[in-house]
Image (spheres, grey):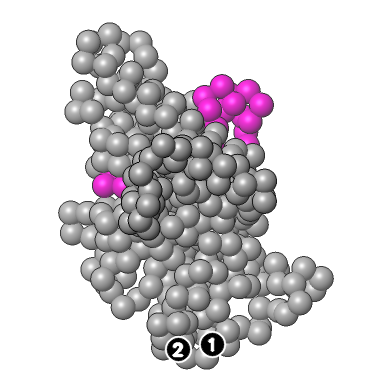
Amino acid sequence: MIVHFRGTRGSIPTAQSGTDITEKVVSALLAARGKDLRSEGQIREFVGDHLPFHIGSTYGGNTPCVQVETGSDECIILDAGSGIRSVGQEIVNNSPSGNTIHLFFSHFHFDHIQGLPFFAPAYIPGNKIIVHGGHENIESSLRNQMQTPFFPIDFDSFQAEFVFQKHAPGDAFNIGDAEISMYKLNHPGDSYGYRFQQGDKSVVYASDSEHPKFAHGKEYDYLDFIKGADLLIFDAPYTHSESISSREHWGHSSNVMAVELAARGEVKTLAIFHHDPNLSDQELCEFHSHTRKFLDRSRIAVREAKPGIPGAPSPRSHPYDVIMSYDGLILNI
Ligand SMILES: [Zn+2]
Ligand SMILES: [Zn+2]
């Protein structure tokens, strides 16, 4: 499977300001002092391989949208945050009509649906959009955001054929040779996670969940849902201290909880997702390095057989890696 992150920011689209860009350019030029950068190749190598990520690039600011390619002609998109706009443009550029698109919704909070009115294939006759979700009111939730006075044209302006499919936790269904199952997450108004299993490869998209205190206990069936996943996409916008104080009950989890659950679920790669809109690229880089340090410290504690560190990964050292997802990241699973 190929997983293409199109929008990784939570809550609200987060644009870079002019000052942000100026600071990146200044930092890059300062870092370039004394380097031999005469050719374009040398400059590109320096920017791509030597500059810190937060100077040479950005995590992006689009709200949640992830594309999963399974080799089937049918397109799979997870959530319709503002990141879906670029997917739509690519689909239309490749083949304007005749597409079958599966659109999975975790839930209908604004950051997960706000891109749909800008999804170009929805306006073209001959396209078929199959909407998957676990909530009772899938169709009305999508229609409502396009009602007057919230949007200039209504849902019926869409010319594509829409089909709505409600699933229940525990259901399993197929798209091509990929088997999909669903899990109910703990979030205000509920959210649903999806597991895509294709042969021996698996990707879990589980965004917008505040894992409860009993998640630390032995009996937590979420662990069965993520068991052995090659990639777990997990919303972790908070530090541990935020998650148990000012942001408790906000419906999201911490990086510490992410590492603990990924370790116990024997996940191979943990992708932190749904980034806090208040954090700059530099702060997100620091968040990543703190998360990595926690993972490394936990592994050392396990090796030295010193119990007591909460969330210590299993001796098998899962997850192998923790990454920060960013808009535009493509992973080959
Ligand atoms: Zn969200
Ligand atoms: Zn939400």
The image shows residue 284, relative to residue 136, as above or below, that is above
- Spot the residue most to the right: 149
Q: Position of residue 284 (x, y in %)?
A: 51, 37
Q: Give the total number of marks visible in the rendering.
A: 2
x and y, in percent, of residue 266 in the image: 26, 36
Residue designated by label 2: 97
Report the side of 241 relative to 217 (left or right): right
As drawn, is 333 to the left or to the right of 243?
left
Q: Is residue 272 visible?
A: no
Is 101 on the left-hand or right-hand side of 27? left
Give the amino acid at mark 2: Ser
Give percent across and percent down for residue 105: 51, 61
- Bounds of the magenta span? 229-251
Q: Which residue is drawn at 80% across and 73% down?
A: 148
- Cβ atoms under marks 1 and 2 closer than 8 Å: yes
Amino acid carrying mark 1 in the image: Ile
Categorize mark 1 by other alpha carbons within 10 Å: few (<14), some (14-19), many (20+): some
Q: Mark 1 points at which residue?
A: 124
For label 1, the SS is loop
Estimate the x, y position of residue 12 in percent, counting from the top left: 65, 51
The residue lying at 47 percent from left, 70 percent from top is 87
Q: How crowded is mark 2: few (under 14 residues within 10 Å), some or many (20 or more)?
A: some
- Say which residue appears at 36% left-offset and 63% top-offset: 68
Q: Which residue is drawn at 47% across and 59% down?
A: 6
Query: How far apart, in angstroms, are the residues tagged by discs 1 and 2?
Result: 6 Å
